[in-house]
Image (tube, helix red, strand yellow):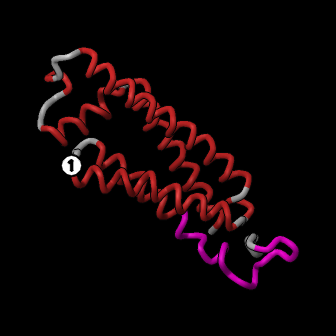
Amino acid sequence: MLKVSVIILTIMLAYAGVYTLMAIFVPKVVAGSAFKAATGETLDSIQDAKHLGFLLRSQRMIGQYALASVIASFFILLGGFQKGRKWAWWSFVIGGAVCWLWGVINALVIVDKVNLPLQSVGAVLWLLGVILPVKVFFAEATKISGSEGDTQESS
């Protein structure tokens, strides 16, 4: 299950990377949908160019932070998760909950028809990726001696 989970999480991170690149390079798509859902108006209704510029720069900055998180998560996936380290599993659980679940809840609350499906796909991949290998990370019989808190998939 660990190998399958690593593949699922790799797909999820690649998907998240594309989503973050959208936020960086075409911020009007991501921000425009959320703005319309929250206010009922389009980005074009913003009269002041400074306000619109600030909103789009903020969306790009959020995308840059998200991209940094995706890159860091690849290191966690390859450096710890695929080796069965508990800390890496917890990193994915907490990080995924903050990113994907918050995104889904926010999109549901404001009824964002563009970001809700995008966030939902990421959330499903994340959930599958962290739930499938639970036994690998928490089975007592598979503990590695000498490295408390870490586990390894049994053969």
Estimate the x, y position of residue 123 in percent, counting from the top left.
Answer: 42, 56
Identify which residue is drawn at 48% across, 43% down.
16
As rendered, which of 105 and 11 lies closer to the eye?
Answer: 105
Estimate the x, y position of residue 48 in percent, counting from the top left.
Answer: 20, 16
Identify which residue is drawn at 45% across, 30% down.
61
In the displayed structure, 119 sits above or below 66; it is below
* SS under mark 1: helix
Residue picked out by circle 1:
110
Estimate the x, y position of residue 140 in percent, counting from the top left.
Answer: 72, 84
Q: Quadrant of residue 143?
A: bottom right
Question: Magenta segment range?
Answer: 130-148
Residue 137 magenta-drawn?
Answer: yes
- The N terminus appears in which quarter of the rendering? bottom right
As rendered, which of 106 and 120 lies closer to the eye?
Answer: 106
- How many marks the image carries: the answer is 1
Identify which residue is drawn at 25% across, 31% down.
32
Q: Quadrant of residue 54?
A: top left
Instruction: Judge left or right: residue 86 versus residue 128.
Output: right
In the displayed structure, 137 sits above or below 88; it is below
Q: What amino acid is labelled 1 in the image?
A: Ile
Q: Quadrant of residue 62?
A: top left
Identify which residue is drawn at 18% across, 36% down.
36
In the displayed structure, 146 sits above or below 22; it is below
In the displayed structure, 51 sits above or below 71; it is above
Instruction: Judge left or right: residue 151 versus residue 95.
Output: right
Instruction: Judge left or right: residue 107 versus residue 95.
Output: left
Estimate the x, y position of residue 137 in percent, counting from the top left.
Answer: 66, 73
User: Residue farthest to the right?
Assistant: 146
As rendered, which of 64 and 2 lies closer to the eye?
Answer: 64
- The C terminus appears in which quarter of the rendering? bottom right
For mark 1, does the 10 Å Cα neighbourhood hold few (<14), some (14 to 19), or many (20 or more) residues?
Answer: some
Residue 74 magenta-drawn?
Answer: no
